[in-house]
Image: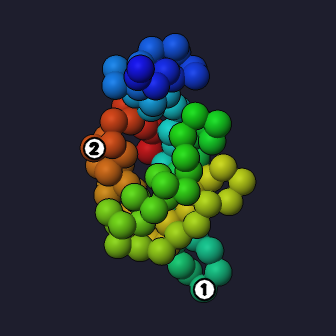
Amino acid sequence: MPEICPNCGLPLEICACENIAREQQDIRINTTKRRYGKMVTIISGIDPSDIDLDDLARFLKNKCAAGGTVKDGIIELQGDHKKKSTAALKEKGYTNIKE
């Protein structure tokens, strides 16, 4: 017997919950200057109840070749990575991204 998704009730093979959650996110990407003039890319607007932020941050850090962290539901990447992170999020299936 196939496993059933607890959210939609469909078998896990055809479950689309994660894809729907990706399309519904209203993501904002900004850069700010921190101490000593260092740039930081801030990615906000992702609902942590739908998407694993630690996994997404790991993916973005890998794609941008940068360090970073997750604080209070916001992903912070070291450096100015607006274009790279936008491209990486689109590759992952996120559509509603504002810079």
Question: In the figure, residue 46 lies in which quadrant?
Answer: top right
Q: Nearer the viewer, residue 9 or 65?
A: 9
Q: Mark 2 sits on what residue?
A: 91
Question: In the figure, residue 14 lies in which quadrant?
Answer: top left
SS type, badge 2:
helix
Please, is residue 11 above or below residue 48 in the view? above
Q: Could you tell me the amino acid type at mark 2?
A: Glu
Q: Quick check: can you spot residue 32?
A: no
Question: In the figure, residue 85 lies in which quadrant?
Answer: bottom left
Q: Is residue 88 left or right of 97 when viewed as pictured? A: left
Q: Residue at x 56, y 50 (%)?
A: 53
SS type, badge 1:
helix
Please, is residue 11 above or below residue 96 in the view? above
Residue 86 drawn at (x, y percent): 35, 48
Q: Which mark is residue 36?
A: 1
Please, is residue 90 above or below residue 69 in the view? above
Q: Is residue 66 left or right of 77 when viewed as pictured? A: left
Label 2 vs label 1: CA separation? 33 Å
Residue 54 drawn at (x, y percent): 55, 57
Please, is residue 13 above or below residue 66 in the view? above
Q: Residue at x 40, y 58 (%)?
A: 59
Q: Could you tell me the amino acid type at mark 1?
A: Tyr
